[in-house]
Amino acid sequence: MNWIRLAIVAAIGAAVVAAGLTLRAHFIGVGEANVQARWDAQTRVDLEASAQLQRQANADLLIRMKNSERNADEQARLAALRTARDAAAATERGRLLATIEALNRRELPQACDAACVAALAREAAASRELLGSCATRYQSVAAAADELRDQVIGLQADAINVCRASAASLLPDHESQ
């Protein structure tokens, strides 16, 4: 009978161990399922956040591109205006130089003696030539100033429209409003 008791105790022990191992495997499976569910949820949250950041970056890039195109169009318009102003100034300068040339070719009246007339003619010719060279230099300085003004206006517009759009996208939501 000892053997039968021993066999029953061994069978009960094996059943308890088997039940314990089964219970342990069940709890491990439940734990793994919980961990996997939390992992999947966090992965979805991370993917949604990443997609939102990408959409925001794309929107910011689109804004910067539109602002850059608008600035380029404005620069082209200003360049056309500057070209028109330069052409008008060149026309006026040409008329001034033609008038100076006509005055230089003009015959002086014989009201005073020859030395007086020659001196007046030289002074007048020198004055007109200086006026013409000053007009030429003034036009080139004005053209350079116009070009620099347009460049500064373009850079300011770029800083306002493009760089601020980039900076705004870097700020947290509560600071950008």
Image (cartoon, rainbow, N blue to C red):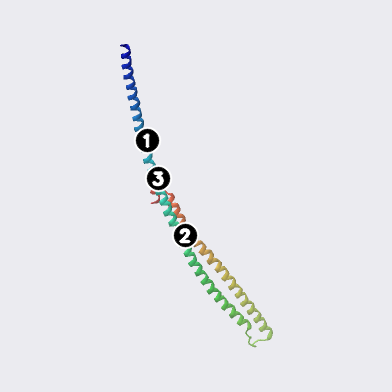
Q: Nearer the viewer, residue 134 or 31?
A: 31
Q: Position of residue 142 (x, y in %)?
A: 55, 69
Q: Position of residue 55 (x, y in %)?
A: 41, 51
What kind of element bears circle 3?
helix
Q: Residues within 10 Å of mark 1 (few under 14, many from 20)?
A: few
| Residue where numbered disc 2 is placed | 68
Q: Nearer the viewer, residue 125 or 5?
A: 5
Q: Position of residue 52 (x, y in %)?
A: 39, 49
Say which mark, if any, is on residue 47.
Answer: 3
Q: CA distance from mark 3 to mark 1?
A: 18 Å
Question: Nearer the N terminus, badge 3 or badge 2?
Answer: 3
- For badge 3, the amino acid type reads Leu
Taking 128 as reference, is 35 left or right?
left
Q: CA distance from mark 1 to mark 2?
A: 48 Å
* Residue furthest right in the image: 115
- Which residue occupies 64% across, 79% down? 125
- For badge 2, the amino acid type reads Ser
- For badge 1, the amino acid type reads Val
Which quarter of the rendered picture does the N terminus lie within? top left
Taking 26 as reference, is 90 left or right?
right
| Residue where numbered disc 1 is placed | 35
Q: Residues within 10 Å of mark 2 (few under 14, many from 20)?
A: some
Question: Nearer the N terminus, badge 1 or badge 2?
Answer: 1
